[in-house]
Amino acid sequence: DYGRGQVVSYRYASVDGKAFPQVRLDHIVVAPSGTVTMDRDHALTTAISGSTATFRDGVLTVNGIRYEMALIPPGEFQMGSASPEANDNERPVHTVRISRPFWFGRTEVTQELFQAIAGYNPSKFKNGPQLPVEHAHWEEFHGFIQSLNQMLGGNAFRLPTEAEWEYACRAGTTGDRYGEIDAVAWY
């Protein structure tokens, strides 16, 4: 751990193209080299893992952990809601065109997948490795995706846009929900 005002310089590189060195600042992967001036107390950690990751035919595998994804085809849909229950930022309903197909997780990111990629589990409820990560900040998921892309050697993965997320979740339906809410959600 480093205290406020301390300057830390670092640099890392891949080892034989097999290991994935990472520097994390408060659990977020940072660039391969740089200087950080601590604006408060931070945890700056380094790790080298021999993680193996592949993505083939909609299946992401990291250290033997499988995560299935669905290919969402391009298309057009009505985004938003006119329902009295809708928030102001969901109005007005408007036509959105998704021009390219994209991969979308069949489930939420599991705790075991997050652990295999990020090296830690931010979840509060750790009652099973197949349960979703339910307590992570946007920055943590951004770091998770950076780590995954580094493992795979590219920039294939990213968070979906709001439109992509709604399009995938609607799954071709046109109503405010794709079924009775008690059957599809805990709320």
Image (tube, rainbow, N blue to C red):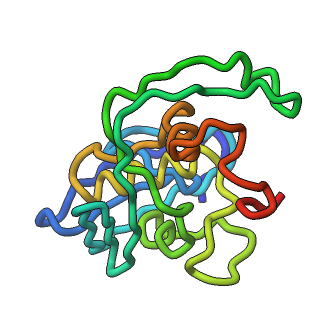
Above or below residue 58? Residue 128 is: below
Going by the image, does 74 lie left or right of 125? left
Above or below residue 55? Residue 158 is: above
Residue 154 percent coordinates (x, y): 23, 47
Residue at image location 65% in from the left, 49% down from the top: 178
Residue 100 percent coordinates (x, y): 31, 32
Above or below residue 180? Residue 89 is: above
Q: Quadrant of the N terminus?
A: bottom right
Residue at image location 42% in from the left, 65% down from the top: 117
Residue in the foreground of this view, choosing between 187 and 156: 187
Residue 62 percent coordinates (x, y): 34, 72
Going by the image, does 168 lie left or right of 12? right
Q: Quadrant of residue 56?
A: bottom left
Q: Quadrant of the C terminus?
A: bottom right
Residue 39 percent coordinates (x, y): 65, 37
Residue at image location 68% in from the left, 62% down from the top: 134
Q: Is residue 5 visible?
A: yes
Residue in the foreground of this view, choosing between 80 and 160: 80
Q: Quadrant of residue 183?
A: bottom right
Residue at image location 47% in from the left, 70% down from the top: 113
